[in-house]
Protein backbone atom coordinates (compact mmCIF):
# COMPACT_ATOMS: atom_id res chain seq x y z
CA UNK A 1 0.00 0.00 0.00
CA UNK A 2 2.82 2.42 0.84
CA UNK A 3 4.53 1.69 -2.47
CA UNK A 4 1.27 2.24 -4.35
CA UNK A 5 0.67 5.61 -2.64
CA UNK A 6 4.23 6.77 -3.36
CA UNK A 7 3.86 5.73 -7.02
CA UNK A 8 0.65 7.76 -7.09
CA UNK A 9 2.51 10.90 -6.02
CA UNK A 10 2.06 10.88 -2.25
CA UNK A 11 4.93 11.80 0.06
CA UNK A 12 5.36 12.32 3.79
CA UNK A 13 3.75 15.78 3.63
CA UNK A 14 0.46 14.41 2.26
CA UNK A 15 -2.60 13.44 4.29
CA UNK A 16 -4.37 10.23 3.29
CA UNK A 17 -8.14 9.92 3.74
CA UNK A 18 -9.30 6.37 4.48
CA UNK A 19 -12.97 5.70 3.71
CA UNK A 20 -13.99 2.64 5.69
CA UNK A 21 -16.93 0.56 6.82
CA UNK A 22 -15.40 0.44 10.30
CA UNK A 23 -13.47 -2.82 9.84
CA UNK A 24 -10.67 -3.05 12.42
CA UNK A 25 -8.29 -4.87 10.06
CA UNK A 26 -8.32 -1.89 7.71
CA UNK A 27 -7.67 0.39 10.68
CA UNK A 28 -4.48 -1.57 11.37
CA UNK A 29 -3.32 -1.13 7.78
CA UNK A 30 -4.03 2.61 7.85
CA UNK A 31 -2.18 3.02 11.16
CA UNK A 32 0.95 1.46 9.65
CA UNK A 33 1.09 3.88 6.72
CA UNK A 34 3.89 6.48 6.91
CA UNK A 35 1.36 9.28 6.28
CA UNK A 36 -1.09 11.29 8.32
CA UNK A 37 -4.39 9.44 7.89
CA UNK A 38 -7.92 10.77 8.23
CA UNK A 39 -10.38 8.02 9.20
CA UNK A 40 -13.86 8.57 7.69
CA UNK A 41 -16.82 6.22 7.97
CA UNK A 42 -18.15 5.47 4.50
CA UNK A 43 -21.53 7.17 3.94
CA UNK A 44 -22.66 4.30 1.67
CA UNK A 45 -22.83 1.97 4.67
CA UNK A 46 -24.55 4.55 6.88
CA UNK A 47 -27.02 5.39 4.14
CA UNK A 48 -27.88 1.73 3.60
CA UNK A 49 -28.65 1.20 7.29
CA UNK A 50 -30.67 4.43 7.42
CA UNK A 51 -32.68 3.25 4.43
CA UNK A 52 -33.55 -0.01 6.20
CA UNK A 53 -34.66 1.96 9.26
CA UNK A 54 -36.61 4.32 7.00
CA UNK A 55 -38.51 1.40 5.47
CA UNK A 56 -39.33 0.04 8.93
CA UNK A 57 -40.53 3.38 10.33
CA UNK A 58 -42.59 4.43 7.27
CA UNK A 59 -45.62 2.14 7.97
CA UNK A 60 -45.85 3.64 11.47
CA UNK A 61 -45.52 7.25 10.34
CA UNK A 62 -49.13 8.45 10.64
CA UNK A 63 -49.85 9.15 14.31
CA UNK A 64 -49.79 12.10 16.72
CA UNK A 65 -48.15 10.61 19.79
CA UNK A 66 -47.59 13.67 22.02
CA UNK A 67 -49.59 16.81 22.73
CA UNK A 68 -47.52 19.13 20.55
CA UNK A 69 -46.57 16.53 17.98
CA UNK A 70 -47.47 16.64 14.29
CA UNK A 71 -49.69 14.15 12.48
CA UNK A 72 -46.53 12.39 11.29
CA UNK A 73 -44.55 12.87 14.50
CA UNK A 74 -42.54 9.66 14.36
CA UNK A 75 -41.64 10.17 10.72
CA UNK A 76 -40.72 13.84 11.21
CA UNK A 77 -38.41 12.94 14.08
CA UNK A 78 -36.71 10.23 12.04
CA UNK A 79 -36.07 12.70 9.20
CA UNK A 80 -34.46 15.09 11.68
CA UNK A 81 -32.38 12.23 13.09
CA UNK A 82 -31.16 11.34 9.59
CA UNK A 83 -30.28 14.96 8.81
CA UNK A 84 -28.24 15.29 12.02
CA UNK A 85 -26.26 12.18 11.10
CA UNK A 86 -25.67 13.71 7.64
CA UNK A 87 -24.34 16.94 9.16
CA UNK A 88 -22.20 15.18 11.79
CA UNK A 89 -24.08 16.44 14.87
CA UNK A 90 -23.30 13.55 17.22
CA UNK A 91 -24.97 15.01 20.30
CA UNK A 92 -28.05 15.87 18.26
CA UNK A 93 -28.66 12.47 16.66
CA UNK A 94 -28.00 10.63 19.91
CA UNK A 95 -30.64 12.73 21.66
CA UNK A 96 -33.16 12.15 18.87
CA UNK A 97 -32.45 8.42 18.90
CA UNK A 98 -33.64 8.27 22.51
CA UNK A 99 -36.77 10.24 21.61
CA UNK A 100 -37.45 7.90 18.70
CA UNK A 101 -37.34 4.90 21.03
CA UNK A 102 -39.81 6.63 23.38
CA UNK A 103 -42.15 7.43 20.49
CA UNK A 104 -42.01 3.83 19.30
CA UNK A 105 -43.03 2.70 22.80
CA UNK A 106 -45.97 5.14 22.70
CA UNK A 107 -46.92 3.94 19.22
CA UNK A 108 -47.02 0.34 20.44
CA UNK A 109 -49.18 1.27 23.45
CA UNK A 110 -51.62 3.27 21.29
CA UNK A 111 -51.93 0.49 18.73
CA UNK A 112 -51.11 -2.99 20.09
CA UNK A 113 -51.83 -4.46 16.65
CA UNK A 114 -48.72 -2.70 15.31
CA UNK A 115 -46.48 -4.40 17.88
CA UNK A 116 -44.69 -6.52 15.28
CA UNK A 117 -43.92 -3.50 13.07
CA UNK A 118 -42.77 -1.48 16.08
CA UNK A 119 -40.36 -4.21 17.15
CA UNK A 120 -38.91 -4.33 13.64
CA UNK A 121 -38.52 -0.54 13.53
CA UNK A 122 -36.92 -0.55 16.97
CA UNK A 123 -34.46 -3.25 15.89
CA UNK A 124 -33.46 -1.40 12.71
CA UNK A 125 -33.05 1.86 14.60
CA UNK A 126 -30.92 0.13 17.23
CA UNK A 127 -28.71 -1.31 14.47
CA UNK A 128 -28.08 2.19 13.11
CA UNK A 129 -27.37 3.75 16.50
CA UNK A 130 -25.06 0.91 17.57
CA UNK A 131 -23.11 1.16 14.32
CA UNK A 132 -22.77 4.95 14.59
CA UNK A 133 -21.69 4.84 18.23
CA UNK A 134 -19.09 2.15 17.50
CA UNK A 135 -17.58 4.40 14.84
CA UNK A 136 -18.26 7.78 16.41
CA UNK A 137 -14.67 8.99 16.05
CA UNK A 138 -14.80 8.56 12.26
CA UNK A 139 -18.07 10.44 11.72
CA UNK A 140 -17.81 13.80 9.97
CA UNK A 141 -19.99 16.55 8.51
CA UNK A 142 -20.79 14.73 5.26
CA UNK A 143 -22.80 17.61 3.84
CA UNK A 144 -19.90 20.07 4.10
CA UNK A 145 -17.43 17.53 2.75
CA UNK A 146 -19.62 16.75 -0.26
CA UNK A 147 -20.17 20.45 -1.01
CA UNK A 148 -16.39 20.87 -1.00
CA UNK A 149 -16.20 18.27 -3.78
CA UNK A 150 -14.57 15.57 -1.65
CA UNK A 151 -15.46 11.88 -1.55
CA UNK A 152 -17.82 10.63 1.15
CA UNK A 153 -18.40 7.14 -0.21
CA UNK A 154 -16.67 4.26 -1.98
CA UNK A 155 -19.80 3.39 -3.93
CA UNK A 156 -18.14 4.46 -7.19
CA UNK A 157 -15.32 1.97 -6.52
CA UNK A 158 -17.73 -0.92 -5.96
CA UNK A 159 -19.61 0.06 -9.11
CA UNK A 160 -16.38 0.10 -11.12
CA UNK A 161 -15.41 -3.32 -9.75
CA UNK A 162 -18.78 -4.71 -10.79
CA UNK A 163 -18.31 -3.28 -14.27
CA UNK A 164 -14.76 -4.62 -14.54
CA UNK A 165 -15.38 -8.12 -13.23
CA UNK A 166 -18.88 -8.55 -14.58
CA UNK A 167 -21.35 -11.34 -14.05
CA UNK A 168 -19.10 -14.00 -15.61
CA UNK A 169 -16.82 -14.05 -12.55
CA UNK A 170 -19.61 -14.12 -9.94
CA UNK A 171 -20.06 -17.15 -7.73
CA UNK A 172 -22.36 -19.96 -8.79
CA UNK A 173 -22.05 -19.42 -12.54
CA UNK A 174 -21.99 -22.45 -14.86
CA UNK A 175 -19.49 -20.79 -17.19
CA UNK A 176 -16.63 -18.64 -15.92
CA UNK A 177 -13.44 -17.13 -17.28
CA UNK A 178 -10.18 -18.94 -16.66
CA UNK A 179 -7.70 -17.06 -14.45
CA UNK A 180 -5.62 -16.02 -17.47
CA UNK A 181 -8.69 -15.05 -19.48
CA UNK A 182 -10.16 -13.09 -16.58
CA UNK A 183 -6.87 -11.25 -16.06
CA UNK A 184 -6.73 -10.24 -19.73
CA UNK A 185 -10.36 -9.13 -19.79
CA UNK A 186 -9.83 -7.05 -16.63
CA UNK A 187 -6.85 -5.28 -18.23
CA UNK A 188 -8.98 -4.35 -21.25
CA UNK A 189 -11.90 -3.14 -19.16
CA UNK A 190 -9.69 -1.04 -16.89
CA UNK A 191 -8.04 0.57 -19.93
CA UNK A 192 -11.47 1.24 -21.41
CA UNK A 193 -12.79 2.86 -18.21
CA UNK A 194 -9.62 4.97 -17.94
CA UNK A 195 -9.94 5.98 -21.61
CA UNK A 196 -6.47 4.55 -22.26
CA UNK A 197 -7.45 1.71 -24.61
CA UNK A 198 -6.77 3.65 -27.82
CA UNK A 199 -3.27 4.80 -26.76
CA UNK A 200 -2.33 1.34 -25.54
CA UNK A 201 -3.61 -0.23 -28.74
CA UNK A 202 -1.40 2.05 -30.86
CA UNK A 203 1.68 0.52 -29.24
CA UNK A 204 0.56 -2.96 -30.22
CA UNK A 205 -0.90 -2.11 -33.64
CA UNK A 206 1.08 0.67 -35.38
CA UNK A 207 -1.39 0.81 -38.27
CA UNK A 208 -4.11 2.27 -35.99
CA UNK A 209 -5.04 5.69 -37.35
CA UNK A 210 -4.51 4.69 -40.95
CA UNK A 211 -7.64 2.60 -41.45
CA UNK A 212 -11.21 3.81 -41.16
CA UNK A 213 -12.77 1.39 -38.70
CA UNK A 214 -14.99 2.03 -35.68
CA UNK A 215 -15.10 0.47 -32.25
CA UNK A 216 -18.36 -1.45 -31.55
CA UNK A 217 -19.55 1.14 -29.03
CA UNK A 218 -19.00 4.12 -31.36
CA UNK A 219 -21.99 5.36 -33.32
CA UNK A 220 -19.98 6.72 -36.27
CA UNK A 221 -17.00 5.37 -38.14
CA UNK A 222 -13.73 7.25 -37.82
CA UNK A 223 -10.08 6.63 -38.47
CA UNK A 224 -8.17 5.03 -35.59
Image (tube, rainbow, N blue to C red):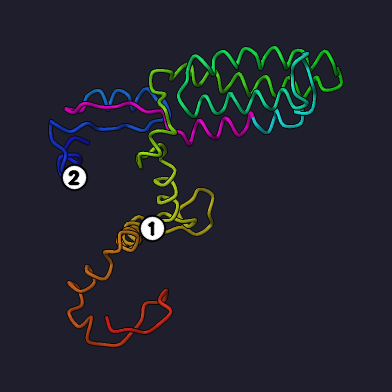
The range drawn in magenta is 33-53
In this view, the residue in front, 167 or 80, is: 80
Nearer-the-camera pick, 160 or 74: 74
x, y (%) of residue 8?
18, 45
Q: Which mark is residue 147?
A: none
Q: Which mark is residue 178?
A: 1
Residue at x 22%, y 31% (from the top left corner) = 15
Q: Is residue 107 left or right of residue 4?
A: right
Asked if residue 217 is positioned above or below residue 71 in the image, the reply reads below
Quarter the C terminus occupies? bottom left
Q: Residue at x 72, y 23 (%)?
A: 73
Answer above or below: position of 91 versus 182. Answer: above
Total numbered labels placed on residues in the image: 2
Q: Which residue is mark 2?
A: 8
User: Which quadrant is the N terminus positioned in?
Assistant: top left
Q: Is residue 139 magenta?
A: no
Amino acid sequence: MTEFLRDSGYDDSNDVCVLTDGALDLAGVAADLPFNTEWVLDWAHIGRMLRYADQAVAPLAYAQLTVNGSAFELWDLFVRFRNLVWTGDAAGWQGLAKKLHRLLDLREKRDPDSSCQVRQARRKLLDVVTYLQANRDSLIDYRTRQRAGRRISTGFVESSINRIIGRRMCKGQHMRWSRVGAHNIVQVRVALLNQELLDLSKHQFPWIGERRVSWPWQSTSRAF
